[in-house]
Amino acid sequence: MPREKVFGSCAAAVADVFDGATVLIGGALGCEGPQGLIEALAQRPVGGLTCVFSPGAAPDAGGFSALEPLIANGQVVKLITAFPWLDDNGLLEKQRRSGKLEIESLPQGTLAERLRAGGAGLGGVFIPTGAGTRFGGGKETRTVNGRECVLELPLKGDFALFRAYRADSLGNVVYRGAGRNLGPTMAMAARVSIAEVDEVCQPGGIDPETVISSGIFVNRVVESPQGSTGRTAE
Amino acid sequence: MVESNRLDANAMAQRVARELSPGETVMLGSNWPGLVGGQVPDGFGVIFLTENGLAGEFSAGAANDAGWVDSNGQGVRLAAGGSVSASVDTAAMLRGGHVDVAIVQAGKVDTRGNFVHWTTGASPGLELPGWAVDMAAGAGRLIVMLEHSADGGESNIVAQLDGPADGRAGAGLIVTDMAVIRVGSEGLELAETAPGITAEDVVAATGAPLRVTGETPAMSFDPPPGTAPAKVFGSGREALADVPDGATVMIDGFAGPGGTPHYLLTSLRDHGAKKLTIISNTAGIARVVNFGTPPGKQAIDHTILIDNGQVSKAVASYPVSPSASNPTAFELAYRRGDVELELVPQGTLAERLRAGGAGVAAFCTPTGVGTLIAEGKETRVIDGKAYVLEQALRADFCIIRGHKADTLGNVVYKGTSRNFNSVMAPAADVTIVEVDEVVEPGELGPEEIVTPGVYVNRIVVRPRDFSPYE
């Protein structure tokens, strides 16, 4: 009997997230993040979380607001991101300055590749990105075909919370427009991957040739309390 | 100088657009570079990539259409023929050498083209790399858009950055709100000035040596000319005409007919290039297993190249027949000493191809540790687990089998015929796809495209009367 993947609520879907867990959180610039799951997690008495959250950011496009409930509660002790979008009075920056929040920043493509390595079972990858810059410092390097490369290590999560468009009850997932972002890679890289979607359908409701995240990578699906994958509120 | 003569962001974007040529793939950073997409004529023929995974040309769209936003968070409408990618694929396009031009908004640039992406003066010790580091490392040319000097008058162009760079020696061209500046081996050279701004104004506002030679031309804002080269070829022979002797060619295929570019295989045979290295899952197994082959016929596979004496080496995971009494043509050639073989486990083959296309130079995989596969290779223990170091695989040409392509080279596959095709397409210098049908841009849904046109150079239609058996 296959394990039931469809959860009735976001609260039930994140009920086993534990203190000190590493949580990969999807989200895309200008698109809605897994807000139902984030808010459910913010209701739970868990802390010490390491979060990977890198939705992209532009000055007026929202950026980190999706993560605010967790940051505001002080549940996050470490944030791994390419876009620590800041302003002088930002919540993120206040917590960083007070020493409650550590931020590791790295290039977005490197973040994606480290997650992919985690999801694909690789021990590490040699890539040219960041060699000779401040993002290559302190890492093993080697020259391959005349190009300096740095060794980047895999990144894995205990949980992944990501927003998608539709899922079937077996966990096959499709995304909408530019909302794909880090979702499919995070889904691969976590032990428990949870997709928050507009709609859960029966198997057959998604054309097999269009599935982006295979049910092999997705453990739980839940319909979003937010409704459709709209843009973040203005 | 009159301060109001400074260009606004749209005018800078208009000037940057003049650097682009049809057929190029151009990644736009967020903020000002995002405006460049709106500055080329409709149907200009570049593929713009945004930081959030859109590929294609686009225009302003509805503000509330779920998921359809650009990397500035603005509503966007993809032109027909666009596609969407995940971030991991955008990263692969950059590192893998598939992006001709990247446009980044920088905080500061120095005379060597080193740059800092974003000033984080409010937050010392914290960097915001975003996509800029990936763009600097991966793109063929890098154009930096820059506010020439800060409000207080301090120049954002400096002799040398006072800290480590985000992008090292990357920028070739700097477009500011005052000027266009080229970064050469001898430092910065003034190329053009904005209307109403003199060369002296620019020199005075620049915190680094700036060469000015003769009369500096004023910037032009005319839209760039040109049309993209056509990707659809009339026949397999035409599409393969430049395959030289000694080329490395990727060819997909399993034991059955699905996924094999049968027509291009016959074209490659007729073309006749010799001493080929083929990279392929099998080295021609369909002919001996004959899954689905009609009675009295033989399946077309790699065998036709081997029988024609064109192959000198195979990199493959399935080079032999399942039956010792019914060997493949490749096995017979191997026994004769006519061909070399590099044997690769199937998953490692896929991963090496992916690495080749994604600009991953080498990777550590547990597959093959402690077996013959690991002999002669570097092994290492990471986090208590043993890994073999495997190298990326690339080829000069790749022939793949799609189901449909649009004229821009976006491809979808049919059923399980996807197999190695989608991972091979990014891994060759020239990728040629054989399809059942070529359709107009817009007929393939942007979310359903599996291999984006970024990776596809040539398209050939398999003739309607072509049989995969002979």
Image (spheres, coloured by chain):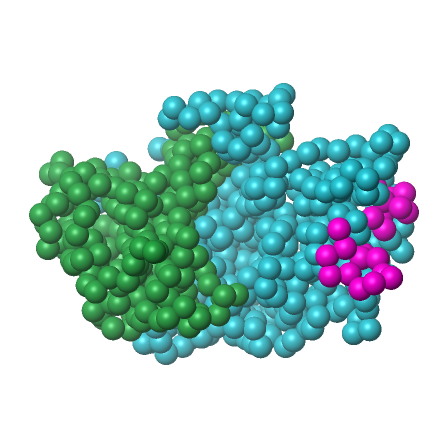
Horizontal side, residue B416 vs residue A119: left or right: right
* Whether residue A172 is situated above or below residue B251 in the rendered picture: below
Quadrant holding the C terminus of chain B: bottom right
* Whether residue B195 is situated above or below residue A160 in the rendered picture: below
* x and y, in percent, of residue B178 in the image: 44, 57
Seen at 35% across and 71% down, the residue is A201
* Whether residue B6 is situated above or below residue B463 in the rendered picture: above
* Whether residue A202 is situated above or below residue A127 in the rendered picture: below
Quadrant holding the N terminus of chain B: bottom left
Seen at 49% across and 44% down, the residue is B136
Seen at 28% across and 43% down, the residue is A158
* x and y, in percent, of residue B24 in the image: 61, 59
Instruction: Give B318 or A188, whichever is nearer the viewer.
Output: B318
Seen at 17% across and 52% down, the residue is A15
Q: Color of chain A here?
A: green
Instruction: Give B304 or B237, whichever is nearer the viewer.
Output: B304
Q: How many marks?
A: 0
Q: Is residue B305 magenta?
A: yes
Horizontal side, residue A16 vs residue B228: left or right: left
* x and y, in percent, of residue B57 in the image: 52, 69
Stretch of the chain drawn in magenta: B289-311
Q: Color of chain B here?
A: cyan
Residue B362 appearing in the image = yes
